[in-house]
Amino acid sequence: MIKLVVGLGNPGKKYERTRHNVGFMVVDELLKKLRVKEYTQECLSHVYKVKVLNREVLVAKPQTYMNNSGLAVLNLLEEYELSPKDMMVVYDDLDLPLGRIRLRLEGSSGGHHGVESIIKEIKSENFARLRIGIGRPKNKDKVVEYVLSPFEPEEEQILYAVLDRASECVLRCLELSPEESMSFCNAPIEV
């Protein structure tokens, strides 16, 4: 049962609407649907306490910057006495096109530095993850600039559909389980 949802991103206005912050954006959309605004600053994160089916769930946005996300996640797991299996991580994925999301129950980092940091710190790959496609830049030497750039105006409509579906996916995983939510989460998104 998921007790902690972690959206990955970078703190600060400078990164707010960038591709690398799509994990934060999904969490923000989820919090909007649950009408939760208040958070505490703890465990190197903004931590929101939400109620789903009369049980408390933690939703966190690490404030450590992407490549050190594992420090915040380790703090959260230790502070709240949770195991990696109790957690779902939401983050951007270059290997999926914009408009696709993919729910996985475990696995490697796939080269994502934020997920690499989490696996290194908690010493486990055994946690659910929701990968949000952002596509790849045409020039593979421009990956850093690409992930730190905002979405283009013509991508906004797709982005809103993705954020809506991804936040619904997280909610279903909280209400049911990631296993029971797979077909909904991995289905194509209509735009």
Image (spheres, rainbow, N blue to C red):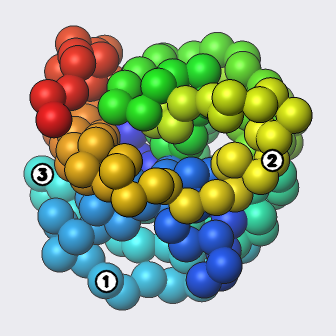
Q: In this view, does 78 lie above or below 119?
A: below
In the image, which is nearer the foreground, mark 3 or mark 2? 2
Work out whether mark 3 precedes mark 2 in sequence or the reverse, and give the earlier one.
Answer: 3
How far is mark 3 from mark 2, CA to CA?
40 Å
Residue 24 vertical position relative to residue 70 in the rendered view, above or below: below
Please tell me which residue lies in front, 7 or 156.
156
Residue tagged 3 = 53
> Percent position (x, y) of residue 33?
16, 64
Frontmost residue, 87 versus 108: 108
Residue 33 seen in render: yes
Instruction: From this view, report whether residue 14 is shown above or below residue 179.
Output: below
Q: Which residue is drawn at 60% across and 83% down?
A: 13
Q: Position of residue 158 (x, y in %)?
A: 28, 43
Going 22% across and 16% down the picture, which residue do you hit? Answer: 187
Between disc 2 and disc 1, the foreground one is 2
Q: 10 Å neighbourhood of mark 3: few (<14), some, or many (≥20)? A: few
The disc placed on residue 144 is: 2
Position of 133 relative to 114 (above/below): above
Residue 128 visible to an observer of this rendering: no
Which disc, if any, is residue 37?
1
